[in-house]
Amino acid sequence: MLKIQEIREIIKLVDSSSVDEFVFEHDDTKLKLKKNSGTTVVSTTQAAPVAVAPVVEAPKAQEAPKADVVKAPEAPKAVKEEVVADANLHKITSPMVGTFYASPNPESPAFVKAGDKVGEESIVCIVEAMKLFNEIEAEVTGEIVEVLVENGELVEYGQPLFLVKEA
């Protein structure tokens, strides 16, 4: 199974190339990338469940994130663009389209909040895509300055999720 960082690199390469469709198959894993009018669609399938670091098994029914209130989709919110004088500010972005979860389940505290220190391999959130819960790592050492999205919010590929002041 590919690691999330490897998938991100493949997405970047396909996105910046003239290739319109990319398919990768290895063992039980299939990764298919397709570009449609400037957007990249990512889908992965697995024939058998495999324990891999970036993929978390779906929580049990009683632990599943609750969606009691369903909102009609609105126009995408403008991403907060702030002029920051500090050159050490790093954006942690979403590697895929999905639902952002700040904690592993509704009863647990958030993985991180503003002011928390993180390391390169610190889990900062989960992005659910097609019933797969993908742990997102900080990939940088520093302090969380701001959480840019809310729990349960739909996120896009490349959308900034956190601002981190690098150590």
Image: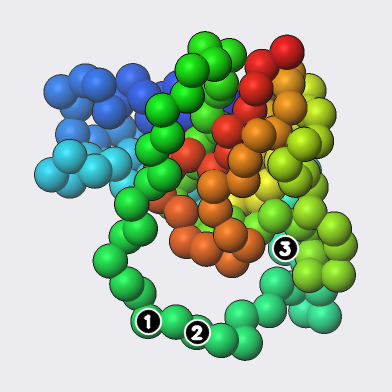
What kind of element bears circle 1?
A: loop
- Residue flagged by tag 1: what amino acid is it? Ala
Instruction: Tell which of 152 and 135 is nearer to you.
Output: 152
Q: Are marks 2 and 1 in contact (CB under 8 Å)?
A: yes
User: Can you name the residue that lies furthest to the right here?
Assistant: 108
Residue 51 location, x and y as percent? 77, 43
For label 3, the residue is 58
Q: Is residue 5 above or below residue 37?
A: above
Q: On the rendered structure, is 118 left or right of 149?
A: right
Residue drawn at the location 54% of the way across and 53% of the way down = 149
Which of the numbered marks, if any, corresponds to residue 123? none
Please state which amino acid type lies under the numbered disc 2: Val
The C terminus - image quarter: top right
Tell me which numbered mark, 3 or 2, is placed earlier along the sequence.
Answer: 3
Q: Position of residue 58 (x, y in %)?
A: 72, 63
Which residue is at a point 29% across and 26% down the rendered structure image? 14
* Residue at mark 1: 72
Residue bearing mark 2 = 70
In which quadrant of the rendered view does residue 122 lie? top right
Compute the Cα span from label 3 to label 2: 20 Å
Percent x, y of residue 26: 52, 32
CA gap, disc 1 and disc 3: 25 Å
Q: Is residue 108 visible?
A: yes
Task: Say whether marks 1 and 3 touch (CB < 8 Å).
Answer: no
Foreground mark, 1 or 3, reads: 1
- Circle 2: element type: loop
Contact, mark 3 vs mark 2 (Cβ under 8 Å): no
**SS at badge 3:** loop
Q: Amino acid at mark 3?
A: Ala
User: Is the residue marked by circle 3 packed among few (<14), some (14-19), or many (20+) residues within 10 Å?
Assistant: some
Towards the viewer: 2 or 123 = 123
Residue 1 placement: quadrant: top right
